[in-house]
């Protein structure tokens, strides 16, 4: 058995941080080692206690008021330095776009392996960290382990449920950020106007595809989302080709795993399925009985979404009243 | 006259993959292509070259023969292709491949910009660009959807989960690009014919001074244990009815019974 020292977690996304703590907690419990959360950013002090309540044994707290969520040089240098000093065996990083860049660059600096977007992490009987992730546009699952230390893995949102907070004691240590010169100058930031900003966090997602003829025809989908307190999203062609939206669900877009996914007029191309295949219950509405989406559906509705969706809205209003 | 290096991966055409009876993926015989986002990177490089009168070279590392793929890149507007081809690259992960690409880039010499896809279409690990930046000690801007190069000032618009960021850096630098940056051209017959006369430089690892310990299993940080088709465990219950209302009623009832809708 290897000499593990600790499991570390880091994410600039607060929710994801708590989910990583949950994942890290089970790994560190199995290995009987400490779980450390690294908190970098502004107002770090106010957040440290919470991380202990959610399961961290130790919190490294680094105030860094200028961090704008970019994987900036200071964040990268501070983390790399801490890892080189304290030698954690496992480092889990939140799999945001910036998180993936950060993980790759730390791995490069430490000449170690990095596995992105892990959907499953466990310790096997020999104390090895085993991961699973989807590759080939959702056509395969790769099981892999590490041959170098530290092991760096990134984990997407909603892969693990955060733990219930409890009154526990932890060790909070205040550290200094490393003083390095930033190489990028963030000139401006603009928020996306899309409604599906939080689609990764939604419990119910109504997704529209090429079977929808105009942007205005999303209205019934939005009504459905409203009743179900869910979010509306779409496939890539509606964003890319028709320019109706800026984001999408799919391999190169958002990966979602809601409790209920309702696909309307979606053919089920593998690139889209790669983004929604982890949904708990999949409902597919398509007038083509041969549509590939039905292979991935729990409830198959063969019919015209222009008729079916309003009928569902009406039926839900009745049922939930 | 900027010199732009484009990193091209020869990827598996994932739409053609099949699994055997045990669920293991069969990659043999599946056609290969320029990885989708790398094609966007190449297109962007060619557009910059056309606007600024520069040069575009491509670099590819593969254990398999990738000359046909590189030839396609040259038809799209690349001026010269570098191909690192060595059986020792078998089982190399992104740690090893990035090291080899960095060594090749050092040998290629001066450059202003390196463009990569945001990730490869098969592995989708999104590591090579950021890793190269560290190995070459230059800035990296990931997820670029708009690039502007003026002298040594690089301005890139990044697309993130919920926002766009406009970021400036000095060249030499690396940018990884997303699909929305452009629509890759389909080369004309003339361009394809011209490409057959362009040079592809093939290097073995010894040409780069890369020792065997830096590649393959020894040079990698991860070890693949298994590659399998994911199990599809969907119930595939067909909701039938005479009218949309009847179908909707049945569906809503099912969802309420599942406890996922309503109280």
Image (cartoon, coloured by chain):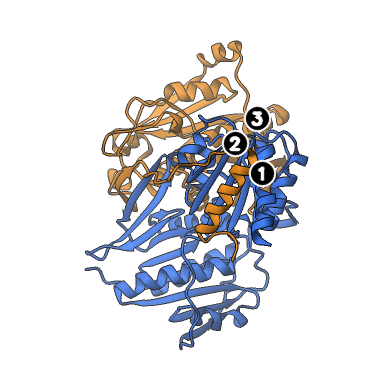
Chain colours: A blue, B orange
- Upstream in sequence: badge 3 or badge 2: 3
Quarter of the picture holding the N terminus of chain A: bottom left
Instruction: Please say if A188 is above or below A305.
Output: below
Can you give x and y, in whole percent of width and height, for residue A200 in the image? Answer: 58, 56
Asked whether the beta carbons under mark 1 and mark 2 sit within 8 Å of each other, the answer is no
Label 2 chain ID: B
* Label drawn at residue A309: 1
Q: On the image, numbered disc 3 is attached to which residue?
A: B183
Q: Residue at x 55, y 14 (%)?
A: B192
Same-chain check, marks 1 and 2? no
Label 1 chain ID: A
Q: Local crowd at mark 3 within 10 Å, few (<14), some, or many (≥20)?
A: few
Asked whether the beta carbons under mark 3 and mark 2 sit within 8 Å of each other, the answer is no
Label 3 chain ID: B
Q: On the image, numbered disc 2 is attached to which residue?
A: B242
Q: Residue at x 43, y 30 (%)?
A: B83
Task: Determine the CA span between mark 3 and mark 1.
Answer: 34 Å
Instruction: Please say if A52 is above or below B22.
Output: below
Circle 3 SS class? loop
Circle 2 SS class? loop
Please say whether residue B169 is visible from this viewpoint.
no
Circle 1 SS class? helix
Of badges 3 and 1, the one in the foreground is 1
Q: Is residue A224 left or right of residue B206?
A: right
Q: Nearer the viewer, residue B64 or A226?
A: A226
Q: Local crowd at mark 1 within 10 Å, few (<14), some, or many (≥20)?
A: many
Task: Determine the CA span between mark 1 and mark 2.
Answer: 15 Å
Quarter of the picture holding the C terminus of chain A: bottom right
């Amino acid at each position: 058995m290897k000499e593990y020292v600790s499991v570390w977690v880091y994410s600039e996304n607060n929710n994801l941080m708590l989910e990583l703590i949950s994942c890290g907690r089970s790994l560190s419990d199995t290995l009987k080692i400490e779980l450390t959360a690294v908190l970098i950013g502004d107002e770090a002090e106010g957040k440290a206690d919470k991380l202990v309540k959610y399961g961290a044994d130790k919190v490294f707290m680094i105030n860094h008021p200028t961090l704008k969520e970019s994987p900036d040089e200071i964040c990268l240098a501070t983390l790399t330095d801490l890892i080189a000093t304290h030698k954690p065996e496992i480092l889990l990083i939140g799999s945001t776009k910036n998180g993936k860049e950060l993980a790759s660059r730390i791995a490069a600096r430490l000449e170690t392996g990095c596995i992105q977007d892990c959907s499953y992490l466990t310790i096997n009987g020999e104390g090895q960290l085993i991961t699973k992730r989807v590759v080939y546009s959702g056509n395969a699952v790769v099981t892999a382990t590490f041959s170098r230390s530290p092991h760096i893995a990134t984990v997407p949102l909603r892969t693990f449920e955060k733990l219930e907070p409890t009154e526990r004691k932890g060790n909070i240590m205040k550290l200094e950020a490393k003083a390095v010169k930033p190489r990028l100058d963030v000139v401006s930031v603009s928020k996306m106007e899309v409604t599906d900003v939080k689609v990764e966090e939604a419990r119910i997602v109504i997704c529209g595809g090429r079977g929808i003829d105009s942007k205005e025809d999303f209205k019934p989908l939005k009504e459905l989302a409203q009743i179900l307190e869910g979010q509306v999203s779409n496939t890539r062609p509606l964003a890319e080709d028709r320019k109706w939206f800026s984001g999408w669900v799919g391999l190169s877009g958002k990966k979602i795993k809601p409790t209920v996914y309702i696909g309307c007029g979606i053919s089920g191309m593998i690139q889209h399925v790669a983004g929604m295949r982890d949904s708990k219950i999949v409902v597919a509405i398509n007038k083509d009985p041969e549509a590939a989406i039905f292979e991935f559906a729990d409830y198959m509705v063969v019919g015209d979404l222009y008729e079916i969706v309003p009928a569902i809205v009406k039926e839900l209003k009745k049922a939930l009243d | 006259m900027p010199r732009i290096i484009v990193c091209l991966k020869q990827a598996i055409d994932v739409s053609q993959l099949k699994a055997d009876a045990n669920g293991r993926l069969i990659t043999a015989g599946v056609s290969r292509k320029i990885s989708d986002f790398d094609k966007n990177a190449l297109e962007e490089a060619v557009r910059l070259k056309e606007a600024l009168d520069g040069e575009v070279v491509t670099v590819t590392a593969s254990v398999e023969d990738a000359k046909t793929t590189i030839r396609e890149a040259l038809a799209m507007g690349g001026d010269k292709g570098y191909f690192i081809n060595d059986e020792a690259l078998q089982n190399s992960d992104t740690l090893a491949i990035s090291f080899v690409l960095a060594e090749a880039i050092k040998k290629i010499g001066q450059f202003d910009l390196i463009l990569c896809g945001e990730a490869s279409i098969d592995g989708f690990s999104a590591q090579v660009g950021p890793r190269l930046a560290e190995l070459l000690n230059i800035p990296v801007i990931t997820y670029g959807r708009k690039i502007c190069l003026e002298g040594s000032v690089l301005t890139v618009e990044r697309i993130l989960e919920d926002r766009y960021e406009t970021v400036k850096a000095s060249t030499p630098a690396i940018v990884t690009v997303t699909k929305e940056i452009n629509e890759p051209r389909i080369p004309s017959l003339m361009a394809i014919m011209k490409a057959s006369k362009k040079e592809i430089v093939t290097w073995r690892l010894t040409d780069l001074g890369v020792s065997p310990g830096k590649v393959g299993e020894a040079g990698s940080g991860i070890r693949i244990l298994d590659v399998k088709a994911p199990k599809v465990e969907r119930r595939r219950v067909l909701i039938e009815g005479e009218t949309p209302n009847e179908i909707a009623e049945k569906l809503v009832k099912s969802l309420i019974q599942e406890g996922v809708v309503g109280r």
